[in-house]
Image (spheres, rainbow, N blue to C red):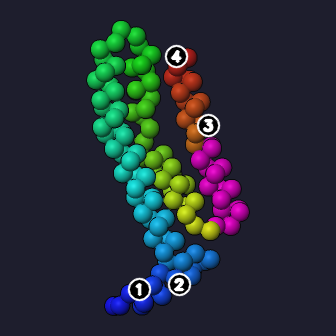
């Protein structure tokens, strides 16, 4: 396959987005997932070790809350950020944004409940 044929394939449009746009969105999605899971597996583990050496409990509490963020939230964050690479209808953009806000509000409420109890 020569470069002009590949270029023409990347310029095909499906639902107002080129194949290149979809590939870019997939790349962003995977990249964001890698960063988020790296954060969870490496950064939070190191922070947890540091907080064990402190006398206060608030930092332990914050780390425990960060550990409770699950894969679905990471997938939603990655999907939202990747969707910014695509030309989507205003309704779909609002829907994705609303879902993200609902999840963060729900998580915020759970954090406040855990903090109070």
Q: Name the mark nearer the viewer: 2 or 1.
A: 1
Q: What residue is disc 3 on?
A: 105
Is residue 68 or residue 6 the one in the foreground?
Answer: 6
Could you give the CA–CA distance between mark 3 and mark 4, rounded to whole angstroms?
A: 18 Å
| Residue visible at 68% across and 67% down in the picture | 89
Is residue 4 or residue 56 the one in the foreground?
Answer: 4
Q: In this view, does 87 lie above or below 44?
A: below
Q: Name the mark nearer the viewer: 4 or 1.
A: 1
Q: In this view, does 84 lie to the left or right of 92?
A: left
The circle drawn on residue 12 is: 2
Secondary structure, magenta segment, majority class: helix
Q: What residue is disc 1 on?
A: 6
Q: Where is residue 24 in the image (x, y as percent from the top left)?
A: 47, 67
Q: Position of residue 65 (x, y in %)?
A: 44, 29
Q: What residue is disc 4 on?
A: 117
* Marks 3 and 2, the one that precedes in the sequence: 2
Q: Do the residues labelled 2 and 4 touch (CB within 8 Å)?
A: no
Q: In which quarter of the image is residue 88?
A: bottom right
* Marks 2 and 4, the one that precedes in the sequence: 2
Q: Is residue 49 above or below residue 31?
A: above
């Amino acid at each position: 396959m020569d470069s002009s044929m590949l270029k023409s394939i990347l310029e095909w449009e499906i639902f107002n987005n080129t194949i290149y746009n979809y590939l870019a969105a997939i790349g962003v999605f995977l990249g964001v997932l890698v960063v988020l899971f790296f954060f969870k597996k490496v950064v939070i583990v190191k922070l947890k070790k540091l907080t064990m050496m402190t006398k206060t409990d608030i930092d332990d509490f914050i780390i425990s809350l960060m550990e409770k963020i699950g894969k679905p939230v990471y997938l939603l964050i990655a999907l939202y950020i990747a969707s910014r690479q695509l030309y989507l209808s205003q309704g779909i953009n609002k829907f994705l944004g609303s879902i993200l806000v609902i999840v963060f509000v729900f998580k915020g409420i759970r954090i406040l409940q855990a903090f109070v109890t």
